[in-house]
Amino acid sequence: MKFCSDCGSKVEKRIPEGDNLERDCCTKCDSIHYSNPRVIVGTVPIKDNKVLLCKRAIQPRYGLWTLPAGFLENGETIEEGAFRETKEETNTEVKMGKLYAIFNIPQINQVYMLHLAEVINEDYCKTSESLEVEFFGESDIPWEELAFPFVPTTLKNYFKDCKKDEYPLTTQIIERPPRKVN
């Protein structure tokens, strides 16, 4: 951040009084601009023990398969955002179920929150965000073509939980190893 969104003056990085982390602080109006993690919401859309996946039509990870998910918008609940994202990426509506998985991804400042959801109709199709939309059983998942680390973890957990018919809420941390610098 270079300029204050409140008054337009320059900002500087410093630790505000009473705080313990460096923040963007306005040099004129003293506004403190906090940078917080982004929340990503989505679903595990299911029907007959198969999962509806989307092949991405947008970057990042264009052309790879994912669960329908995206950024939570201001004014939405996590359920509303997950429902909206599913509709945007699959063109179908779902019956929202319980919160199923939370992923903390600290290196990119994101938190993923995924709900189980039942696909109601067979009206799913590609959208401006998805090249293809298709149901997959466990043996049909294109495991080598999945877009993000949370996707295979969620799918493996879901199919394991299906066998027990128990779907506990799980919370996990996804940490990428640091890049090697030569």
Image (spheres, grey):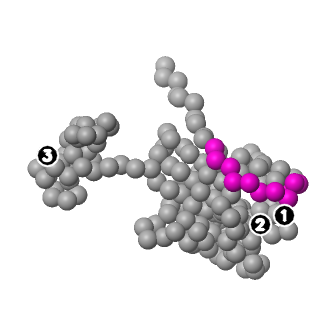
Of residues 94 and 20, the one drawn nearer to the viewer in this rendering: 20
Q: Quadrant of residue 69?
A: bottom right
Range covered by the magenta-colored residues: 162-172
In the image, residue 21 lies at what x, y percent? Answer: 32, 37
Residue positioned 20% across, 52% down in the render: 31
Q: Residues within 10 Å of mark 1 (few under 14, many from 20)?
A: some
- Amino acid type assigned to the residue bearing label 3 in the image: Thr
**Which residue position is annotated with label 3?**
27
Q: What amino acid type is highlighted by mark number 1?
A: Asn
Q: CA distance from mark 3 to mark 1?
A: 57 Å
Q: Secondary structure at mark 3?
A: loop
Query: Amino acid type of disc 2?
Result: Ile
**For the view shown, which residue lies furthest in the front direction?**
18
Furthest residue toward top? 182
Q: Magenta stretch containing residue 167, yes or no?
A: yes
Q: Is residue 133 left or right of residue 41?
A: right
Residue 56 can be seen in this image: no
Image check: 59 left or right of 3?
A: right
Label 2 sits on a secondary structure element that is strand
- Position of residue 65 relative to residue 25, above or below, is below
Q: Could you tell me which residue is drawn at 31 percent across and 36 percent down?
A: 20
Residue 173's x, y, as percent? Answer: 60, 41
Callouts 2 and 1 close, C-beta under 8 Å? yes
* Snapshot quadrant of residue 79: bottom right
- Sooner in the amino-acid sequence: mark 3 or mark 1: 3
- Mark 2 → mark 1, Cα distance in angstroms: 6 Å
- Mark 2 or mark 3: whose residue is earlier in sequence: 3
Disc 1 designates what residue?
A: 49
Tell me, for residue 46, which label it has, or none.
2
- Separation of marks 2 and 3 at Cα, in angstroms: 52 Å
Question: At 21% from the left edge and 40% from the top edge, which residue is drawn?
Answer: 17
